[in-house]
Image (cartoon, rainbow, N blue to C red):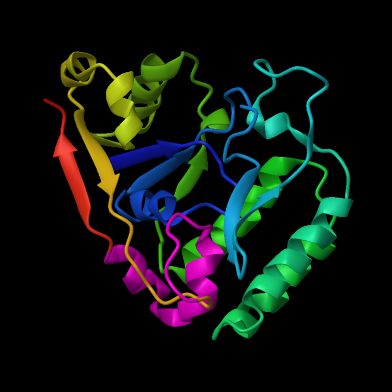
Amino acid sequence: MIVSINQPAYLPWLGYFHRIAASDLHIVLDHVQFEKNSFTNRNKIRTAAGPCWLTVPVRTGGRFGELPIMNVEIAEPAWRRKHWDSLRFAYAKAPFFRDHQHFFRGVYERDWPLLMPLQTEITGRLCAAFDIATPRISSSELRVQGRKGDLVLALCRAVGATTYLSGPLGRDYLDPDAFAAAGIRLAFHDYRHPEYRQVSPGFEPFMAGPDLLFNHGPQSGAILRSGQVAIAAAA
């Protein structure tokens, strides 16, 4: 069984979804510490003026380094109107925006006390739109402890993984020998971003997932999968 693990993200980019699609099971790493200025609560969309950050304000009480992602609270409601207006203004002329505007408008009309349910709602919708049926579970359900590579290995063992599909940065902290000793193949997912038509001239990579969806609708899943991928086993 191929397993991937990633922290939850707000409006994730295409590589995030491709790794989920390449897995038999995806673990959402929600019990680890929230990191400031990460993609956990922000991402970029493309506007006529260029990339624009959308950030969900969070309340941490100065507890960076000790607050689990699953417990992070959203600070105030004004961001919801700003984010919806930003999406609407950026993509109103995109060919498939109208097909999905009801869902996104509904998301931004709802009250979200916690960050995690917001991430889960949007990621689930985008997975469905990209034809990704990989089951997703939360790491908090597994009650596994550890740090960095040890935590990843423990999670893989807890779910019976035979292969762990890591992001490219895993090369910096995962121990191939430890995975080999556990009978788990370690592989790295290097996603080469595909180019596609965007509503503005030219192409800007690494935008939030809705950028592809609003521009290409039912073809989005095929375009996402067309990105060249190098999946290399650990040396």
Q: Residue at x 62, y 58 (%)?
A: 122
Where 78 falls versus 59 (above or below)? below
**Residue 165 in picture, x, y percent from top left:** 28, 38
Residue 219: in magenta span: yes
Where 171 falls versus 198 (above or below)? above
Residue 99: in magenta span: no
Q: Residue at x 57, y 24 (%)?
A: 32
Mainly helix, strand or loop, the magenta region?
A: helix
Where 58 falls versus 83 (above or below)? above
Image quarter where the C terminus lies is: top left
Image quarter where the N terminus lies is: top left
Please give left or right for residue 162 compared with residue 205 in the image: left
* Visible residue check, residue 129: yes
Q: Residue at x 61, y 27 (%)?
A: 35
* Visible residue check, residue 107: no
- Span highlighted in magenta in the image: 201-226
**Residue 22 in picture, x, y percent from top left:** 29, 52
Q: Residue at x 47, y 75 (%)?
A: 198
**Residue at the limit of the structure toward the front, as seen here:** 49
**Residue 103 in picture, x, y percent from top left:** 69, 72
Q: Quadrant of residue 47?
A: bottom right
Q: Nearer the viewer, residue 160 or 69?
A: 69
